[in-house]
Amino acid sequence: MTPAPWTALWVTLAVQTLAAVALTTPSVMAPAVGPQIGVGAQHVGWLISLAYLAAMVTGLGGGSLSQRHGPVRISQVALTASALGLALMAIGHPAALLIGAAVLGVGYGLPNPTAAEILSRHAPAARRGLFFSIKQTGVPLGVAFTGMVVPVLLGAGSWMQTLLVLAAGLAVVMMLIGRVRCVLEPGAALLGMAVTSPATAAAPPTHTTASGTDPTPPAGLRQRLLEPLREVLGFAPTRRLAIASLVFAFTQVSFLTFLVSLLKLEHGYSLSLAASLLAASQAASVAGRIGWGHVADRWVDPARLLGALGVAMGVAVTLVGLAPADAPPAAMLALTLACAVTAVAWNGVFFADLVRLVPPERVARSTGATQFLTFMGGVGGSAAFAALVSLTGSYAVVFTALGVLPALTGVVLLVSARRPGPAQEPRRD
């Protein structure tokens, strides 16, 4: 392979990791910083929800921005937004916290569409599952990095200095990424991206439809945001993938958000032990994402593997809920790891399957559209789970019921994968 695939991989992994660092930082800092600014630590949930809402909307337009300005340039925008969001939050005023959270969401919504375009161009076709899976390890790596670094920075200085140091680090990486733009976007070195050259700037923009290239420009911002959703939901294979991502993200966020509460409140574990099991799940999910990507490349069709992961995560989550209150830590560790390598490790296989189903010119747009539903599952997951716990009074009961959703979704994917047809044939590179 040429150096471009590896350059593409480290750039997309770095952007994904640092975007996750920025989004996770408020949650890690909340218990220590909340009392200092007179805000309860639990209110960080509102900031994260606002960030995810901003990410949902931003992701819809991320594909069009990537096509227009180049994925590397928009990756730089993502890191700039993440750094700016942290800097705004360092002001400490409630309004600045809200605006900073929204800007963080902008930074978090762009990496997936840009990475999909970069890797679809440069990752070897026979290794796409592995490349996308490695890129997706940026999320747990970012969470782990934040958990290790933020407490150290807080011990060395104020919380405002901590945010500014992290923002400066993101800004440095943003500038470094610009140096490889000529490698990942050869046209940018010659023309500053063809779409922004004088010749094309004067011409009306075009967009691709099922019947070919349509010279009519999109009607406006609303259509540019909604058109990718229509494309994804109007094509049966991508529609199934998008809905599956919503359900799997719902399951993933619920597991990660409420596992510690289940273990502490209903199993009687200490907070440190419960948090240790959650940390172990993050490590396992990194290995799981890479491993499943390799499996998808070598042995199992991505659509079938994704369906199998759905069934497996449903079983694993249900078993967590059914575990008796006096279950030993070793047993709960095993169940936690089973959830980690399924419910937290499906993302790379999902992107590998999506990329093979859509034409190259629609990869970034389709990724942004499916990400909208993925983030919707993430936003709704914690809220719905919390409401059900309030209704039933039991985390275990809700975990048990939660497993039904991904299991049924996995069965649908497996059944659909057994019905090959022209619409489901992977695109040819």
Image: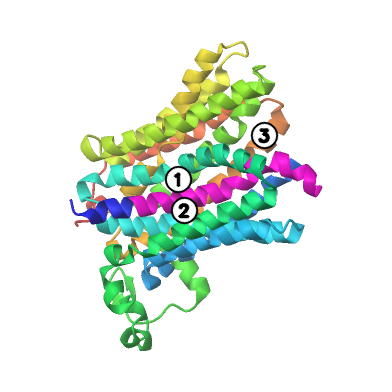
- Do the numbered discs 2 and 1 sit on residues whose CB atoms are within 8 Å? yes
The type of residue carrying mark 1 is Ser
Q: Earlier in the sequence, mark 2 or mark 1?
A: 1
- Quadrant assignment, res 150: top right
Residue that lies at the very extreme toward the front in this rendered image: 156
Q: Is residue 62 within the magenta segment?
A: no
Question: Is disc 2 placed on a helix, strand or loop?
Answer: helix
Q: Earlier in the sequence, mark 3 or mark 1?
A: 1
- Badge number at residue 245: 1
Q: Nearer the viewer, mark 3 or mark 2?
A: 2
Density class for disc 2 (Cα within 10 Å; few <14, some 14-19, many ≥20) is many
Q: Which residue is mark 3?
A: 388
Asked if 271 appears above or below 357 in the picture, the reply is: above
Whole-angstrom CA distance, mark 3 to mark 2, is 25 Å
Left/right of residue 31 with respect to residue 310 in the rendered view: right
The type of residue carrying mark 3 is Leu
Q: Which contiguous range is marked in magenta?
A: 10-38
Question: Is disc 3 placed on a helix, strand or loop?
Answer: helix
Counting from the top left corner in percent of width and height, residue 317 is at: 51, 27
Left/right of residue 82 with respect to residue 302 in the rendered view: right
Q: Is residue 110 visible?
A: no
- Do the numbered discs 3 and 2 sit on residues whose CB atoms are within 8 Å? no
Q: Which residue is mark 2?
A: 371
Q: Quadrant of the C terminus?
A: bottom left
